[in-house]
Image: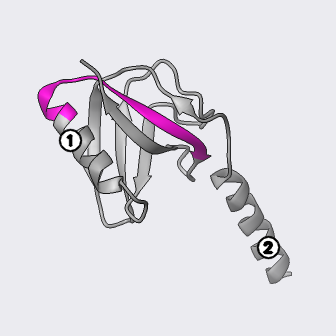
Amino acid sequence: MKSVWITLLLSLGAVVTAQAGVAGWTDAANVKALEANEAGRFTAKLAVEKNTSGCRNADWFYGDYGRPGSELMYRTLLEASLAGLKVQLYVTGACDLKGYSGISSVRILP
């Protein structure tokens, strides 16, 4: 019985972290919060109106430290936050367990 529950929980976890929506660029917004931690990823909050990912929490985003370019994405978000510049994020369509959208690119807008 335990193995059935474990299999069910793992299956549900896979569904939650799987593709939830469509990849694409968010609208431009200011960085409201940015956090670097030891959990293997950084998180950012933007007050976006358009997020194509379909994730449960449309304002929160994450980048995995192990992915190429993640350090540059974090630095870009930090610079934009400090300068008060708007950014756009490219969401991958993947969602994590908290409903945050996975990102693969960041661009600063004038």
The local secondary structure at tag 2 comes to helix
Q: Which residues are magenta?
A: 80-94
- Where residue 106 appears, as percent x and y from the top left, is 36, 37
Q: Is residue 86 magenta?
A: yes
Distance between mark 2 and mark 1 Cα atoms? 40 Å
Evaluate if marks 2 and 1 touch, with contact meaning CB atoms under 8 Å apart.
Answer: no
Q: Residues within 10 Å of mark 2 (few under 14, many from 20)?
A: few
Residue at the spot of label 2: 7
Q: Amino acid at mark 2?
A: Thr
Q: In the image as oriented, which residue stretches furthest toward the bottom? A: 2
Lower position in the chain sequence, tag 2 or tag 1: 2
Q: Is residue 100 left or right of residue 15?
A: left
| Callout 1 amino acid | Leu
Q: Does residue 3 sit above or below 68 in this rendering? A: below
Q: Position of residue 66 (x, y in %)?
A: 41, 65
Query: Residue 64 placed where, x, y %?
Result: 42, 58
What residue does disc 1 label?
78
In the displayed structure image, the side of residue 37 where residue 88 appears, left or right: right
Helix, strand or loop for disc 1: helix
Q: Which mark is residue 100?
A: none
- From the top left corner, tell me how far across and down residue 53 is, in percent: 59, 34
Q: Residue furthest left?
A: 83
In the shown orientation, is residue 102 left or right of residue 54?
Answer: left
Q: Left or right? Give the position of 31 relative to 3.
A: left
- Residue visible at 51% across and 20% down in the picture: 50
